């Protein structure tokens, strides 16, 4: 089910990204700098900005926004890499699980879990502190994605800890919860705030390719993305 759903989700995301690129190209005036930067060069430039979180450094209105997003982002990336490695290792090379704590992949997984928990915790505290204030009220979609992401990190960590403690029954139940939350992230990827990563990145790439500069800040939304 996971693989079938992942394939469907991947196709849906590609379709959405293709529609977004087509819409931007149709409604953006092609100036003299259009196409001077190749798509490949635009991808490299946009990736550099995303990796460095450059645009977040320009947001001076909230000092907590950058460290929260930075740690959650890299925690998620680390765990995604670990999941891909384990998936390939398990089904292609029949590796034995669980990996020892000294294994580099396991170390990366634990670092990623800590970063994800810290980042999402900071985001939760920041959103709670803005409720009732001048900042925009957080929506259901904001809280749903944030709490599911926090739950993924918490349940995954709890699974490892309870397994190491020898609490077999508890470990299986926490792992079950963890897998359900991970399935949620995968199944709703093109339709949740997680899709922001893909759509924002594509927007940055197009802005460079079309000669519009470096594009809008990473933390904002284009009109098309808002409609999506």
Image (spheres, rainbow, N blue to C red):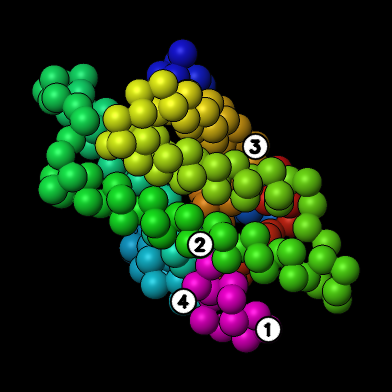
Above or below residue 128? Residue 164 is above
Residue annotated with mark 3? 191
Image vertical order of residue 191 relative to residue 50, above or below: above
Quote the CA–CA distance across marks 1 and 4.
15 Å
The local secondary structure at tag 1 comes to: loop
The structure residue drawn at horizontal position 55% and vertical position 42%, both measured from the top left corner, is 151
Q: Earlier in the sequence, mark 1 or mark 4?
A: 4
Instruction: Tell me residue 189's x, y (percent).
Output: 56, 36
Q: Earlier in the sequence, mark 2 or mark 1?
A: 1
- In screen coordinates, is 29 left or right of 115? right
Label 2 or label 3, whichever comes before in sequence order: 2
Find disc 4 in the rendering and name its residue: 54
**Real-space Cα separation, disc 2 to disc 3, in angstroms:** 22 Å
Residue underneath mark 1: 61
Mark 4 burial class by Cα count in 10 Å: few <14, some 14-19, many 20+:
some
Which mark is first along the chain, 3 or 1?
A: 1
Q: Nearer the viewer, mark 2 or mark 1?
A: 2
Does dot 3 land on a helix, a strand or a loop? helix
* Magenta span contains residue 112: no
Q: Residue at x 13, y 20 (%)?
A: 94
- Residue 65 magenta-highlighted: yes
- Which span is picked out in magenta? 56-68
Please state the horizontal and vertical placement of residue 167, each as a whole percent of the image: 36, 28
Observer-nearest of 198 and 174: 174
């Amino acid at each position: 089910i996971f693989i079938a759903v992942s394939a469907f989700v991947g196709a849906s995301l590609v379709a959405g990204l293709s529609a977004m690129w087509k819409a931007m190209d149709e409604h953006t005036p092609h100036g003299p700098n259009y196409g001077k930067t190749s798509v490949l060069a635009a991808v490299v430039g946009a990736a550099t900005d995303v990796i460095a979180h450059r645009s977040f450094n320009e947001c001076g209105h909230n000092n907590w926004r950058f460290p929260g997003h930075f740690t959650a982002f890299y925690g998620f990336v680390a765990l995604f890499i670990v999941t891909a490695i384990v998936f390939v290792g398990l089904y292609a090379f029949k590796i034995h699980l669980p990996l020892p704590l000294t294994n580099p992949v396991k170390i990366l997984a634990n670092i990623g879990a800590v970063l994800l928990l810290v980042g999402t915790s900071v985001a939760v505290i920041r959103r709670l502190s803005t409720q009732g204030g001048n900042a925009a009220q957080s929506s259901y979609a904001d809280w749903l994605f944030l709490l599911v992401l926090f739950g993924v990190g918490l349940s995954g960590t709890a699974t490892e800890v309870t397994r190491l403690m020898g609490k077999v029954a508890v470990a299986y139940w926490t792992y079950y919860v963890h897998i359900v939350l991970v399935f949620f992230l995968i199944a709703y990827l093109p339709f949740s705030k997680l899709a922001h990563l893909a759509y924002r990145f594509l927007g940055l790439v197009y802005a460079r390719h079309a000669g519009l500069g470096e594009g809008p800040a990473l933390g904002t939304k284009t009109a098309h993305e808002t409609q999506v």
